[in-house]
Amino acid sequence: MSEPIETSFHAPRLASGAPQPEARHAPPPRYNFIGGHNDPAIIPGDALAEAAARVIRRQAPSLAMYHLGQGRLGYPPLREFVARKLAARGVTGLSADDIMITSGSGQSIDLVNQLFVGPGDTVLIEEFSYSGAIVRARSAGARVIGMPLDSGGLRIDALERCLADLASRGVTPKYIYTIPTVQNPTGSILPLDRRRALIALSHRYGVPIFEDECYADLTVAPDAPPALHALAPRQIIHIGSFSKSLAPALRLGYATADWSVLGRMSSLKGDGGTGALDQMVAAEFLGERFEAHVGRLRTALRAKLDTMIDSLEREFGASIEVWRPEGGIFVWMRLAGDTDVRSLLAPAAAAGLVFNAGPDWACDPESAKSWLRLCFALPDERTIRDGVATFAQVCFEQTGSPRRGDNRDRAET
Ligand SMILES: Cc1ncc(COP(=O)(O)O)c(C=O)c1O
């Protein structure tokens, strides 16, 4: 075993703000409800293998060159595919040269922060949001202000008040980060009238919108409003991902924005290029099969969501508040009373179950202390049912609630 880093040879030379070493990788828990994993049963193994064999045979010589010798924006057939996919979100008129492929959409979040944010700058983020977006903005030195949400997503009245208040103090935020189409973690879809109002506010106050469409392929209903980028291309920096529609282990995301931004993001992306095999295989597979694949995935996720909601109702009854998502892979819920979900992490882990504590998904952690997020994409339906029952039992043992569940009194068992 290696010694703790604090007493290591290296410790005195670490940069200030260096993180603690992460915990060593442990075997996956039995009930894994954390992170944004995908459904293993839907990964198209054979089709990916065939696509890989075909494209490698055809393109192998280009692997000899950085960026496959085809420029820093990424593999052209994948960019062409993204342009077509965005057209289905209402974003028309884009060519492959308006798209940049990134190593996961998380890389785009890094690049946007590098480009826009310096110490002391202000950014606006939905009050509950993707932890990676909150953490990255803070690491760039931003002061993060949380914008209230309701079941329709970002509350435009609150945003307007905040922008006016900041303007009165001479502060212009660097961006408004929003996940309008299947919000993470709440699962809401921003209606069209709010999209238009958001764009009007962005225009009035001169604040770019940073639109993250990570989950837009996974809506329950087929008719989500158009992407913000479709409504105001110049104001919007738009990013998306193949992590949720295909596979997160393939590190593939994309960005589109006015060239004054995208061209600079490309200048900053000094990683020698996103993994070429990932790009080539995805383009080869997705070009022909995206719709069919995503259709299967949506059906599977819908069944898992129903199982998750049924299980929560059966085990927790009315003791919890659950936001039924309009797509995606998460359920966002609040436990009874004043429970601090962080106190449940260790007992849950001891029972073989992991979940994401709400405070990590909130601009103001205390405001989400009784909230938590469950990802239902990875476990099969039986594991979801058993996992929710296990979680309810842990909650009862630690907090006394839910006392009743699955037609029995837990205090009597
Ligand atoms: C809203 C949102 N944006 C971006 C990401 C980053 O995803 P990736 O880097 O895998 O594309 C995630 C991951 O879960 C997410 O939830």
Image (cartoon, rainbow, N blue to C red):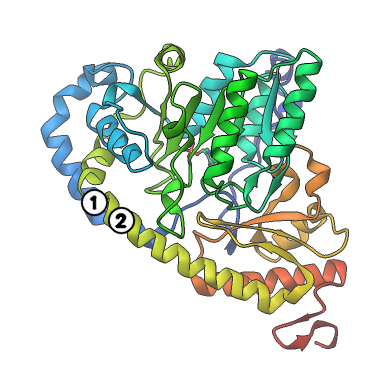
Residue nearer the viewer, 356 or 240: 240
Residue nearer the viewer, 39 or 364: 364
- Where is residue 93 shown, x and y percent of the image? 29, 28
| Element class at badge 1 | helix
Residue 222 drawn above or below residue 138: below
User: Does the beta carbon at disc 2 come under 8 Å from ligand 1?
Assistant: no
Q: Amino acid at mark 1?
A: Arg
- Where is residue 251 shown, x and y percent of the image? 41, 36
Q: Residue at x 30, y 33 (%)?
A: 83
Residue nearer the viewer, 280 or 194: 194
Residue 66 drawn above or below residue 352: above
Q: Amino acid at mark 2?
A: His
| Element class at badge 2 | helix
Q: Residue at x 69, y 84 (%)?
A: 406
User: How many angstroms separate mark 1 from mark 2 (CA)?
Assistant: 6 Å
Q: Quadrant of the N terminus?
A: top right
The answer to whether residue 7 is seen in the rendering is no
Q: Quadrant of the C terminus?
A: bottom right
Residue 381 appears left or right of 164? left
Category of crowding for the residue at label 1, using alpha-carbon neighbours closer than 10 angstroms: few (below 14), some (14–19), many (at least 20): few
Q: Which residue is mark 2?
A: 293
Q: Residue at x 37, y 18 (%)?
A: 272
Residue 79 appears left or right of 3? left
- Where is residue 393 shown, x and y percent of the image? 75, 73
Category of crowding for the residue at label 2, using alpha-carbon neighbours closer than 10 angstroms: few (below 14), some (14–19), many (at least 20): some
Q: Which residue is mark 1?
A: 289
Instruction: Tell me, yes or no, whether the two marked residues, 1 and 2, touch with CB atoms within 8 Å.
Output: yes
Q: Residue at x 22, y 32 (%)?
A: 77
Residue 323, disc: none
- Where is residue 206 shown, x and y percent of the image? 61, 17
User: Does the beta carbon at disc 1 come under 8 Å from ligand 1?
Assistant: no
